[in-house]
Image (cartoon, rainbow, N blue to C red):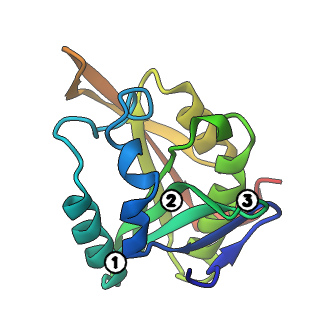
Amino acid sequence: MSLPFLKTANLDLRPLETTDADGPYLHWFNDPEVCRSNSHFVFPYRREDAIAYIQTVNSSRTDLVLAIVERNSNRHIGNIALTGMDAIHRSGEFSIVIGEKECWGKGYSKEAGGALVDHGFKVLNLNRIHCGTFVDNTAMRKLAEFLGMREEGIRRSALFKNGRYVDIVLYGVLQHDYLRKKPS
C-alpha cells in the first residue's frame, strides 16, 4: 500500500492503486444505493474500467484523486478528488464518495473534505474550489456548506437519473473566504 499523502484524525488519504480495483471500490459504482445521487450506475463498472481510471488519474497533474482509508481498520472506504484543476484560472472541482455504507454518518466526509480543500488552497494555490450535486442530495449539500461553499446556482434538468431529470445545485468557495472562515 502507498504511504498516506494526507492524514486526518481518523483517516489516511493515499493515491489510488491498481489493486484497489480488486477490493470494494469496484462494487461501490455498481451499487444503486451508493450511486443514488451521482452520475454513476449507468453502465456496469468493470475492473478494467477501474484500472484504466486509476492509471489515468495517477499520471495526471490536473486531477488529484485519493483513496480514503479508515486508519484503525486500514480499509478503503471511499474516494475524494480535486479534478479539472486549471493552472491559469486556479480552480478545481471537488468530489467525494464514501462507498462503504457502514461508514456513512461518521463525519469522515468532513474530515477528508477539510484536509483536501486545505491542500487545494494552501499547497496547490487554487483560488476557487467548486462542486455540484443533485438537488436532493442533502448530505453533499451540508458537506459543501461545511467546507465554506456557497450555493451559486442550479443547472436545471442537468442529468437523467432513475427515470427523471434532476437539477444540479452548484457550490463554490474562494480561497480568501475559506481561509478567513476555515471550518473547524
Gap in angstroms between the C-alphas marked 2 and 1:
14 Å
Q: In which quarter of the image is residue 143?
A: top right
Residue under label 1: 62
* Relative side of 167 to 164, left or right: right
Residue type, numbered disc 1:
Thr
The picture places residue 20, in percent across and down from the top left corner, at: 43, 66
Mark 3 lies on a secondary structure that is loop
Q: Earlier in the sequence, mark 3 or mark 1?
A: 1
Say few, some or many: other residues with alpha carbon within 10 Å of mark 2 (under 14 / 14 to 19 / 20 or more): many
Which residue is painted at 54% across and 37% down in the image? Answer: 140
Residue 80's label in the rendered image is: 2
Quarter of the picture holding the C terminus: bottom right
Q: Residue 2, can we see it?
A: yes
Mark 2 lies on a secondary structure that is strand
Establish if 128 lies above or below 184: below
* Relative side of 182 to 21, left or right: right
Residue type, numbered disc 3:
Ser
